[in-house]
Image (spheres, rainbow, N blue to C red):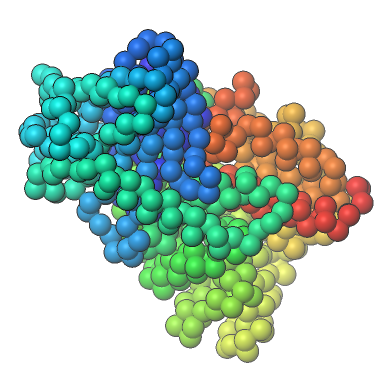
């Protein structure tokens, strides 16, 4: 399947409401608008024949290519080196800066010749609504307009008034083909705008450069807020920018990834839609962003969580919170299969929507309350109405924490008594008790304390496997689970507790391979799905954090540095790493970048203190 670039051979650009992936060959092969979770305009990443693309590449067969971000920005530069010259395609999306959702989004593709002469071929082949919405093509002197029944894409040429008329052809499929010839120092390009613009208009080079300067300025000003000055500054700043790119500004919600259906195993069925906001991811984000000084983004995510808590309801028994929502906070995530798409490198089914949305996953309550508690310690506090809703959630949890559930990994093999769900129920109750005491607020504290202690006792008896001398995934198995690497981080056990040290050693033997960490062993604990999976990048960073808190600082640092080598050429990480070292799963994944930030900050602190190696 050589028609598909490696997942890692992509960069990400965006405008804080949607995003696009740009491959190292100059192809935009994933772009949804007007939102992250909208139907696709370009989707060749999931079907190279029927998905649609926008490609700009040299008009020769042999060339070298490089890709980088302009420092401290989300402006992506793809460089092409040939015998006759050097050229660049500079991709960016002007940031709206608006808290209101917009129906219009621009992707600017500036093409320039750096040295010698360069001829570029341009192909624009949109396939609206995952290839299900046909389009008509209208060509004018200043650009082209692709019109579907519900979707419009306008292409405007960046040119000067005295330029020769561009060599443009519209083929029988209604796709645009053009050729651009440039000499050293010349700059042209195009602007793709998703939205209902009346007709293409002329765009001069000066206007494109103004948009470029404004976009560069925005990202540099935003990153200047960072307070992180540790050993891995460039790495963490790239992660922070990536997380910002995956944030939907109107609501503050953070999508788990901007992509859908990229496989956890090439050719396998574990292909999920991640273009939604998980309560879990949003909760972790508050901690990570505050750790780097991004208070405004942390507060926005806190408000997003508050809104979900305040609109709570338990209509179907899955709890007052859904595990995930659309970027605008709505909860219609009906899962469907795109049977007409073959999937990335033949990995079918291609799923959009997410059938796990209504699962009962108890851990989200601990993650939500822990983030509310952390935000409160940084001066971002809940008001009276917010506190009332927090109490409602915790009162519900006191009666429901002992239920079988689907677990953090959203297994589809039936509910179980997952230890991690119980652990985070303990966290939720503990943080609620602390918040009530800190602010003297009314609450059923004695009941919360009794249930918190009951959870603790149950985990220590039923969650502990005497045979394995380790905490287990759920009460019906002796399988290990790397989600439990968070046990000392949340304060449930001391990092020096013999029970925890024994658990960490067992995970090291069974779940860790050359510093990379599996979630669990699906063969030993069936999850209702066929096939295998790679190591989980966020689990590897959580392992670094666990080693650090346990005092194994040298081992933690080596593991962290090894893991950094699995990032792509831009410092971006997908969900998983295959046995070959290839990145697999949705890309880039927010949870991985959050775990990277947490691990680096934790490791920095221990190294600065000169902590002894245990």
In x, y percent, where is residue 89?
Answer: 37, 32
Left or right side of 401 for 85 = left
Name the one closer to the observer, 61 or 310: 61
Does 355 sit above or below residue 51?
A: below
In x, y percent, where is residue 27?
Answer: 35, 27
Q: Residue furthest top?
A: 61
Total of numbered circles in the picture?
A: 0
Question: Which of the image's four quarters has the N terminus?
Answer: top left
In x, y percent, where is residue 481?
Answer: 68, 42
Left or right side of 561 for 142 = left
Q: Quadrant of residue 454?
A: bottom right
Left or right side of 234 for 508 = right
Left or right side of 567 for 503 = right
- Residue at 73% x, 38% y is 561
Residue 74 appearing in the image? yes
Residue 345 appearing in the image? no
Name the one closer to the observer, 24 or 263: 24
- Residue at 31% x, 34% y is 187
Q: Quadrant of residue 289?
A: bottom right
Name the one closer to the observer, 117 or 27: 117
In x, y percent, where is residue 42?
Answer: 28, 33
- Residue at 38% x, 36% y is 90
- Residue at 33% x, 65% y is 99
Does 4 sit above or below residue 506?
A: above
């Amino acid at each position: 399947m050589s028609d598909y670039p490696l997942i890692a051979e992509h960069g990400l650009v965006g405008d804080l409401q949607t995003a696009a992936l740009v491959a190292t060959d100059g192809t935009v092969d994933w772009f949804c608008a007007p939102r992250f979770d909208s139907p696709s305009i370009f989707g060749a990443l999931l079907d190279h024949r029927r998905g649609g693309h926008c490609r700009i590449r040299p008009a020769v067969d042999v060339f070298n290519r490089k890709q980088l971000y302009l420092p401290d920005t989300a402006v992506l530069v793809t460089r092409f080196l040939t015998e006759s010259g050097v050229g660049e395609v500079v991709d960016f999306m002007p940031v709206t800066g608006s808290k209101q959702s917009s129906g219009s989004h621009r992707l600017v593709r500036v093409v320039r010749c750096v040295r010698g002469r360069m001829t570029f071929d341009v192909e624009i082949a949109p396939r609206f609504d995952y290839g299900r919405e046909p389009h008509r093509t209208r060509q004018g002197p200043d650009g082209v307009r692709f019109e579907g029944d519900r979707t419009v894409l306008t292409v405007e040429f960046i040119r000067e008034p005295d330029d020769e008329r561009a060599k443009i052809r519209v083929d029988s499929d209604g796709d645009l083909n053009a050729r651009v010839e440039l000499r050293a120092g010349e700059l042209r390009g195009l602007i793709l705008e998703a939205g209902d613009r009346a007709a293409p208009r002329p765009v001069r080079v000066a206007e494109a450069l103004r948009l470029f300067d404004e976009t560069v300025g925005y990202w540099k000003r935003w990153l200047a807020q960072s307070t992180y000055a540790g050993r891995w500054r460039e790495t963490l700043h790239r992660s922070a920018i990536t997380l910002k790119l995956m944030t939907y500004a109107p609501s503050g919600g953070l999508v788990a990834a901007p992509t859908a259906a990229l496989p956890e195993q090439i050719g396998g069925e574990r292909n999920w839609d991640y273009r939604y906001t998980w309560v879990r991811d949003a909760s972790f984000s508050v901690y990570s962003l505050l750790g780097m000084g991004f208070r405004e983004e942390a507060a926005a995510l806190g408000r997003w969580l508050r809104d979900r808590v305040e609109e709570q309801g338990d209509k179907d028994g899955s709890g007052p919170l859904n595990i995930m929502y659309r970027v605008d906070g709505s909860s219609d995530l009906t899962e469907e299969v795109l049977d007409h798409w073959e999937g990335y490198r033949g990995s079918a089914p291609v799923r959009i929507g997410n059938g796990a949305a209504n699962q009962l996953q108890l851990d989200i309550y601990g993650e939500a309350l822990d983030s509310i508690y952390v935000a409160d310690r940084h001066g971002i506090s809940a008001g009276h109405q917010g506190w009332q809703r927090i109490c409602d959630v915790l009162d519900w949890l006191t009666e429901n924490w002992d239920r079988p559930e689907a677990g953090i990994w959203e297994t589809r093999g039936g509910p179980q008594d997952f230890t991690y769900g119980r652990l985070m129920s303990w966290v939720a109750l503990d943080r609620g008790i602390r918040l009530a005491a800190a602010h003297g607020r009314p609450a059923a504290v004695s009941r919360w304390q009794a249930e918190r202690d009951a959870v603790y006792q149950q985990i220590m008896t039923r969650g502990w496997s005497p045979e394995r001398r380790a905490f287990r995934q759920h009460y019906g198995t002796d399988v290990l689970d790397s989600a439990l690497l968070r046990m000392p981080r949340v304060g449930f056990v001391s990092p020096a507790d013999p029970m925890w040290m024994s658990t960490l050693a067992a995970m090291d033997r069974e779940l860790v391979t050359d510093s990379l960490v599996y979630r669990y062993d699906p063969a030993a604990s069936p999850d209702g799905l066929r096939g295998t999976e790679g190591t989980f990048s966020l689990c590897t960073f959580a392992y670094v954090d666990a080693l650090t808190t346990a005092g194994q600082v040298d081992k933690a640092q080596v593991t962290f540095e090894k893991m950094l080598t699995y990032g792509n050429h831009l410092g971006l990480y997908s969900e998983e790493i295959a046995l070959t070292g290839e990145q697999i799963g949705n890309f880039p994944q927010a949870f991985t970048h959050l775990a990277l930030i947490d691990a680096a900050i934790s490791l920095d602190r221990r190294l600065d203190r000169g902590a002894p190696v245990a």
